[in-house]
């Protein structure tokens, strides 16, 4: 792989850009791999990358039904933060956030990580107490956040109306090193690095079954033939239940639609990320100038990758009191993704009843920010059978009642 | 937008008039049940790509709970029925099998336990 650099741009500029290589190869499937990851989204590719980088396992295939990064990795609102209440969550999300800091250098791919800062607005007294508690918890966890007053919120985000009659801004939980990154680039950067290590990324290859012998996984059947493996990682977000069924076990989660929308591009007006959980909306401005708005999930099971129309109205209507300027904007695009939500709103990174088969799912509405940490922990789990990052996120926690209850801590946008 | 027919008050209600209540026909566990059974009742849910049975409440209408049969990949609504039953009515099941050949309620129910 030729490295990307300022020198490479100059070199290619001098020869009409004829020398750029394909970023990753499109090989034919081999008969057998040491490990197979189902799902070439951010989490799947990151898992493969750290299997190779941290554990030297490079005989790996990443199998994808559609195209690389075409699921929730390409459909989220690109927010990165780690201000979680519970210790296991703070650990894995902070690991992820810290890996984002150097990801562009590590992958030699510009993922445009922008630590512009994230505010979680407190607009009810309940939220004030909740976020102050989170700020204290974060201090103990070594996650740098602070509680800020309304004047500071206004200073950080002048377009905000903090005196709204219905939902006045009472303060906020501020994480200065949170921010955004270019979501597609995260998938592309990992894919390029995986391909460079000799891994096969098999796109347009649908898994149709999981084969096993004596309770141990032996491979998968796909639309491009049977492929054997010693270890299997299922990282398929909204379709986790469907693939788990092929592997012969059930999961405690439901798939629902989560949607987002963007406005027409406008001049720079907001250089931070704002999350307003009381009104079910979150907002940032993209580099193109679009206001990127995320809403809440639909409340019923859905695999259609589009959300309910009335949720757009509810989301925008609620945000307008806090961001009056939004009322004059035209909305350009709206899209949905299918997220897998567990009972305690925390992910599952776990061994499964099928030996050699591992699952990484349940990221629900907050997976993008976790991609590098999830990959890091899941790769360790697959390689060694255990990982301190994923220890608390096992499937057995639902039976044992050891929940990681972030739905209380994070409200809707999680 | 989903439109569900409320079997109690007879109104064809928009999604905004309703509240989704999750999977229908869950067996309730209580004191004396095993950890596994209780996990099943509390957390394990049917999550099919296709025909699904759900509870809905006509919250901005008559307020009653009812059941609906719906497809999760096309959002087609097959029908609604009373919540006072352990099993969907036979004519609804026949209607669904007509539209989804090869599908059976026992198959949906099987993975439930």
Image: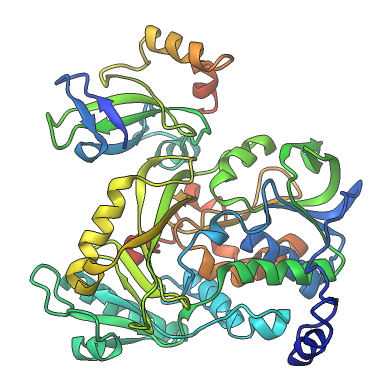
Left or right, A73 with respect to A353, comes to left
Q: What residue sits 33% from the left and 60% below the top?
A: A412
Q: What residue sits 17% from the left and 79% below the top?
A: A161
Q: What is the x, y in percent for residue A16?
A: 80, 80
Pick the residue in front: A352 or A283.
A283
Pick the residue in front: A350 or A258.
A258
Residue A388 visible to the viewer: no
Q: What is the x, y in percent for residue B78?
A: 39, 20
Picture quadrant where residue B65 is located:
top left
Residue lying at the far right of the rendered structure:
A31
Check the image and report above or below for A146 versus B61.
below
Residue A66 visible to the viewer: yes
Left or right, A28 with respect to A74, comes to right
Pick the residue in front: A267 or A261.
A267
Q: How is the image coloured?
A: rainbow
Q: What is the x, y in percent for residue A173?
A: 31, 81
Check the image and report above or below for A380 versus B78.
below
């Amino acid at each position: 792989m030729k490295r990307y650099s300022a020198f490479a741009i100059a070199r290619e500029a001098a020869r009409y850009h004829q020398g750029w290589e394909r970023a990753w190869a499109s090989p034919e499937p081999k008969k057998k791999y040491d490990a197979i990851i189902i799902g070439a989204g951010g989490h799947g590719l990151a898992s493969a990358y750290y299997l190779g980088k941290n554990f030297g396992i490079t005989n790996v295939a990443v199998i994808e039904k559609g195209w690389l990064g075409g699921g929730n990795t390409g459909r989220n609102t690109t927010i990165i933060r780690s201000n979680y209440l519970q210790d296991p969550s703070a650990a894995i999300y902070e690991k992820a956030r810290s890996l984002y800091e150097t990801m562009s250098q590590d992958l030699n791919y510009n993922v445009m990580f922008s630590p512009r800062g994230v505010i979680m607005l407190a607009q009810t007294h309940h939220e004030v107490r909740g976020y102050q508690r989170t700020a204290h918890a974060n201090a103990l966890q070594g996650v740098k956040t602070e509680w800020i007053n309304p004047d500071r919120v206004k200073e950080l985000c002048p377009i905000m109306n903090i005196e709204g009659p219905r939902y006045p801004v009472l303060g906020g939980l501020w994480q200065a090193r949170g921010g955004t990154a270019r979501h597609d680039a995260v998938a592309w950067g990992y894919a390029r690095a995986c391909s460079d290590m000799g891994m096969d990324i098999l796109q347009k290859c649908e898994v149709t079954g999981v084969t096993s012998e004596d309770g141990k996984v032996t491979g998968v059947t796909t639309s491009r033939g049977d492929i054997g493996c010693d270890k299997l990682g299922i990282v398929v977000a909204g379709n986790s239940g469907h693939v788990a069924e092929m592997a012969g076990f059930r999961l405690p989660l439901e798939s629902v639609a989560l949607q987002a929308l963007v406005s027409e591009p406008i001049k720079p007006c907001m250089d931070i990320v704002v999350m307003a959980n009381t009104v079910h909306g979150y907002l940032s401005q993209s580099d193109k100038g679009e206001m990127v708005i995320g809403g809440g999930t639909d409340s019923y099971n859905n695999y259609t990758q589009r959300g309910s129309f009335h949720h757009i109205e509810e989301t925008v209507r609620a945000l307008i009191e806090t961001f009056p300027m939004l009322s004059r904007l035209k909305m350009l695009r709206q899209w949905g993704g299918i997220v897998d939500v567990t009972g305690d709103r925390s992910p599952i990174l776990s061994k499964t009843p099928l030996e050699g088969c591992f699952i990484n799912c349940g990221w629900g509405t907050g997976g993008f920010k976790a991609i590098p940490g999830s990959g890091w922990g899941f790769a360790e789990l697959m390689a060694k059978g255990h990982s301190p990052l994923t220890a608390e996120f096992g499937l057995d926690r639902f039976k044992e009642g050891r929940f990681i209850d972030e739905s209380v801590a994070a409200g809707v946008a999680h | 937008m989903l439109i569900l027919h409320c079997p109690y008050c007879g109104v064809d209600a928009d999604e905004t008039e309703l509240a989704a209540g999750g999977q229908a026909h869950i067996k309730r566990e209580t004191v004396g049940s095993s950890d596994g059974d209780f996990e099943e009742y509390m957390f394990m849910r049917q999550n099919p790509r296709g025909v699904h049975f759900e509870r809905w409440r006509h919250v901005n209408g008559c307020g009653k709970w009812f059941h609906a049969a719906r497809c999760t990949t096309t959002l087609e609504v097959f029908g609604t029925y009373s919540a006072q039953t352990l099993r969907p009515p036979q004519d609804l099941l026949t209607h669904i099998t007509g539209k989804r050949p090869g599908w059976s309620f026992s198959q949906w129910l099987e993975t439930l336990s």
